[in-house]
Image (cartoon, rainbow, N blue to C red):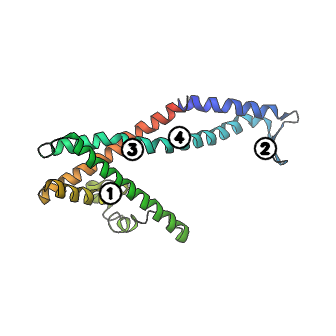
Amino acid sequence: MWERKGRELQKPIEENFTKNYIKNDSLILNNIGSSKFAILPADKISVIAFNKMRMLRQRLYSNSIGAFSKTFIFILLPFFAGFFFLIFFKKVKYYGASLMLATHFMIYNLCIYSLNVLLNYIVKNLTGLKDSLLMYPFKAIIFNKTIEPYTELIFGSSFEFFHLIFWMPWLYIAFKRLFNTVWWKNIIISYLCSRVFFYLIFGILKKLLVAFTIWTMHW
């Protein structure tokens, strides 16, 4: 489907370029609303059209996946709630209570993302630092070249660790307040929930989102 969408986009671009073909083996590309033009070899029409198509297709894909991702994330709420209900089935009488807990967790998650984006934007403009400000100390201490193989075995990648470090404390506090879970069980359950939720979001949901976005591009 991805290649078919590319061919659909490339065909009108190539036809438009061909209309501007001049017999002196050159191609004049007139900019819209401008008198400027570029003279390029006519035998490169297909290559030029292909490169322009790639940029157009990527921009279309980025705009679509950005819009869908904001909606798809809420599809996971019933699955988060189901996992909470499964773990605490002896203490949670109704599924709706688990759904409320999952909703609160999602709101917290979105707040953390918003804070991270805001801090990164400010720091990037002030210092030019490209790495996440919240992750910078952890990458320097925990994910350095010396101990990185061991930390990846326990926490996964630094990207996954970023989510664990912010999800686990919230889950720990929530489980303690709601279910009064023993501290060592609470740590295990919080860790397990964080790993499962990360897999659901960035393992399953991400792949479904990419597939759905490419599919809708053919509508």
Give the mark, 1 or 2, whose residue is nearer the N terminus: 2
Give the mark, 4 or 1, whose residue is nearer the N terminus: 4
Q: Nearer the viewer, mark 4 or mark 1?
A: 4
Give the mark, 4 or 2, whose residue is nearer the N terminus: 2
Seen at 29% across and 59% down, the residue is 151
Q: Which residue in the structure is indicated by mark 3? A: 73
Q: Which residue in the structure is indicated by mark 4? A: 64
Label 4 sits on a secondary structure element that is helix
Q: CA distance from mark 1 to mark 2?
A: 48 Å
Q: Nearer the viewer, mark 2 or mark 3?
A: 3
Q: Which residue in the structure is indicated by mark 2? A: 32
Q: Position of residue 123 (x, y in %)?
A: 50, 68
Q: CA distance from mark 4 to mark 2?
A: 25 Å
Give the mark, 3 or 4, whose residue is nearer the N terminus: 4
Q: CA distance from mark 3 to mark 1?
A: 20 Å
Q: Which residue in the structure is indicated by mark 1? A: 161
